[in-house]
Amino acid sequence: MSLVAFPFKNEDPEVLIGNVKVALSHPRVEEVLCVGASEDRCFTALAEASPKLEKEHGKPVKVIVQERIGELRPGKGDGMNTALKYFLEETSYRRLHFYDADIVSFSQEWITKAEEAADQGFDVVRHYFPRASTDAMITWHITRTGFAILWPESTLPWIEQPLGGELLLSRSVAEQLLNDERVRRQSDWGIDTLYTFAIVQNQFSLYETYIGVGKLHKLYGKLTDLKTMLIECFSAIQSLQGERVPKGGTHRIEYPGPVPQKVREKIGYDVEGSLSLLAEGWTPRQEELLAYFPDKVQEGMLACRSFPRFGFMDEDTWYRVYQILLEHFDPTDRDWQELIFRLWLARVLEYTVTVALRGYDYALHYLHQMVSRYAAQAFGKGG
Ligand code: DGY
């Protein structure tokens, strides 16, 4: 029997309460846990609604505030780890499901598919979805790229959505994660990277289940919305770079179905709004930091101060830039934070106009091939 956990922060209470009801109606679910970042409006609405929900479904609905467990910015990591702790210390259920609280397309099928894969003996089940060709820009250019560069022989680069917040963990996986000092420390957006990494490093078997309706959730505007996430996701990978990960491992991916037209046509971010960000916020120190990078990156980025430029940030250049960032980036330094954001922005814009413009199928094929090329290149260099 299973516990379903929804970590949340300032979500639309109606959406979250709807999702709680879906989970409570599932025969495999014994209890629902909602972990709020703070006692915000959504928390209050949920706490008020929970006695009625419990009565209607005859199952407990707990609404708690996340504990301070980690050492970095208190964020999603503390929320997920609080749920792990609750699951292990307060219950004896066999499985724990996590779902993002803002999904408007959530249904019982998500739970059923995960349970069915776990019934076949998989330790971890991750949900993956069709995503727009200009969405998932951290996933592709930071996380999967980093996994390919650093651990090309492991299964890490081949995990479809390593930052996804929808997953099922068996009890032994939850124990392993909560006992892992690195996981407990990661209180911020880096938590998904840490869970994915620790699961693969410990060789748990992994199934990725495909949810064809896609994950309809709030959209991003300008790419600045993703700045903190980008920095924390890169920094999580950087903190792991000295680690060893075994080759291979059990990893099955459910074959994807046709991609809904809505996803194929969606534009993942505000391109025009993001262009101007290349020119904003430069400091003399950031200009100095550019000295670490190849000449064409230095020149291109400096030129951005007066006019947006990004054509230089192609796939091979990004590989080099990424390696330099692994060595020199300081996540606590404001100038490095601004610089990594702008370097990544140049990569995303270059990809958008040279690849994504060619159409959905072309772009998705390119992104998968790009990860393979990065892994092959890193493999040739001994990882
Ligand atoms: C990602 O890159 O996967 C983030 O969710 C932003 O889209």
Image (cartoon, rainbow, N blue to C red):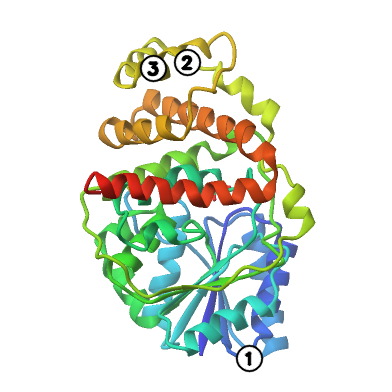
The picture places residue 105, in percent across and down from the top left corner, at: 72, 66
Q: CA distance from mark 3 to mark 1?
A: 55 Å
Question: Picture coordinates of residue 89 (x, y %)?
Answer: 36, 79
Q: Residue 300: which disc? A: 2
Instruction: Kindly indicate whether the residue at mark 2 contacts the one at mark 1 (C-beta within 8 angstroms).
Output: no
- Graded by Cα atoms within 10 Å as few (under 14), some (14 to 19) or many (20 or more), the crowding at tag 1 reads few
Image position of 60 with respect to 42: above or below: below
Q: CA distance from mark 3 to mark 2?
A: 14 Å
Q: In the rendered image, which quarter is residue 195 located in?
A: bottom left
Tag 2 or tag 3, which sits nearer the N-term? 3
Density class for disc 2 (Cα within 10 Å; few <14, some 14-19, many ≥20) is: some
Report whether the residue tagged 2 is closer than 8 Å to ligand 1: no
The answer to whether residue 379 is left or right of residue 23 is left
Give the crowd class for mark 3: few <14, some 14-19, many >=20 residues within 10 Å: some
Q: In this rendering, is residue 354 above or below 171?
A: above
Q: Earlier in the sequence, mark 3 or mark 1?
A: 1
Which residue is depicted at the point 69% across and 88% down? 57
Q: Position of residue 19 (x, y in %)?
A: 68, 71
Residue annotated with mark 3: 286
Disc 1: which residue: 27
Q: Which label lies toward us, 3 or 2?
A: 2
Specify the amino acid type for callout 1.
Answer: Pro
Image-quadrant location for residue 321? top left
User: Is 6 drawn above or below residue 27 in the view shown?
Assistant: above
Amino acid identity at mark 2: Gly
Q: Are marks 3 and 1 in contact (CB under 8 Å)?
A: no
